[in-house]
Amino acid sequence: MSDDAPVHPKLGIRLNRICCIGAGYVGGPTMATIALKCPEITVTIVDMNEARINAWNSDNLPIYEPGLDEIVKSCRGKNLFFSTDVQKGIEDADIIFASVNTPTKTQGVGKGRAADLRFIESVGRTIAQHSSRSKIVIEKSTVPIKTAEAIARVLTANEVSSGTVGKRFWILSNPEFLAEGTAMKDLDKPDRVLIGGQVDDAIQVLVDIYAHWVPREQILTTNLWSSELSKLVANAMLAQRVSSINSIARLCERTGANVKEVSRAIGADSRIGPKFLNASIGFGGSCFQKDILNLVYICEQFGLDEVAAYWQQVVDMNDNQKISFTHRIIQSLFNTVTKKKIAVFGFAFKKDTGDVRETPALTVCDMLMADGAIVHVYDPKVTYADAVQEFKYHDIEVNPEQFIFSSSAQEAANGAHAIVVLTEWDEFKTYPYENFYRAMMKPAFLFDGRNMLDHDGLERLGFEVHALGKPSSSAASADEGQAYITRACSSPTMRGGGRIALSADSLA
């Protein structure tokens, strides 16, 4: 390393090198953007997963995100590097981002709700072990409030054994507010960048990095605890909107209202706005459910049981939406899907990503297979191995004879009793559904779990369409038949005691 590296006059840290521990969905895109926007800073991403690092150094990146590939390839080998040498990464840089997984605990106290902080704790111990200089340590992972305090204790407690006595560690919180599928756009033009800390000089170091491309008024600074909590609350509020509109969709299905029209009406209110008001199969991904459950657990720990119950209901509504949607599929297919081929369009939890963590498709496919269905999935970015791995993570055994990945949407639809749309990939809107219809069993059903297709057009092709937030085409036909009977019974002929023969055709 060059001896003339710029050094902060008060903190004594070198300013031209960054190390990020964790080469995942957050660390990779964030560091690639910093490398692009700050060419004078050398950015090294370290991870002990050799296969993942090899992928970052190859032409096939380990994650899919629009725009990421181009940025990585333009910076890699210049001021962006990927390595498994964690010790060297920490030794060479004084600005260290911690971007490791913080999953929900699967055992012990807080099981199913509390965040599992063993990886973030391990990062603290590793930094202390390999630090010979003062460091700024930045939480990039989504963590519960007061995690920075725990990291600080780990670093301080390990000073003596690690030989770092006299050195200082400044802890900052810099939560990510990225949406998978638009992460690179979110990084390029963020709504805001949030930095929490207790020491102004340390905060300013990170502010100066982001100020290379983010207007200063969009860089918000707070204390550590506000920053940590803001991330959880942001995800909870967004998820709340999803569950709220999904609950209204259920009401619309019973009353004859159309949830799209309701969403448009309330979204026109500037106090509400239109975002996250599209009824769907429910939210997924690594953040929403995990962060809400973490928030629930924190509230319970502080004795705020009513607050905890309020936020728990957001998750419960989301779970109920997936179950209700699947029950609707089974009931519509004459109350059984045993031995029936079901074409599933999309397995990723949202479009423009290959991420399957907590995808709603998991619940839907599992329930269909439990009822005997043969599920054929087509997703443009998800692999069979990734899907099966997510099932295993949830302790669900998959019968390979019931869960099959197709190479095309047409292959999935051939001979299927129903098409079930579970991811809102744009390409699904452009498909030749008339070809699918001809190749399917009749009656041909289509269940739109994303409310994204032209339902009227599909019905004209012959599909029986079931969408969220409005009665199905079969229900509408039944209503029309009932209305015909009502009109007939109130006619002068019927009032005079006459009889009208109602053929099947007259009710069609």
Image: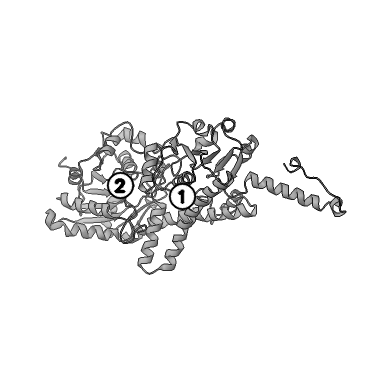
Question: Quadrant of the image for the C terminus?
Answer: top right
Q: Are marks 1 and 2 in contact (CB under 8 Å)?
A: no
Nearer to us in this view, 6 or 168: 168
- Left or right: 477 as drawn, with respect to 445: right
Nearer to us in this view, 507 or 271: 507
Query: Which numbered disc, 1 or 2, marks the residue that appears first in the sequence?
Result: 2
Inspect the image, locate mark 1, and give the three-letter code of the amino acid beneath it: Phe
Nearer to us in this view, 185 or 139: 139
Q: Residue 241: x, y in percent? A: 50, 55
Task: Tell me the SS state at disc 1.
Answer: loop
Nearer to us in this view, 79 or 351: 351
Question: Quadrant of the image for the N terminus?
Answer: top left
The residue sitting at 24% across, 48% down in the picture is 95
Which residue has dot 1 on it?
283
Inspect the image, locate mark 2, and give the three-letter code of the amino acid beneath it: Ile
Which residue has dot 2 on it?
209
Task: Tell me the SS state at disc 2.
Answer: helix
Q: Residue 54: x, y in percent? A: 27, 35
Vertical comparison of 194 with 45: above or below? below
Mark 2 neighbour density, 10 Å: few (under 14) some (14–19) many (20 or more): some
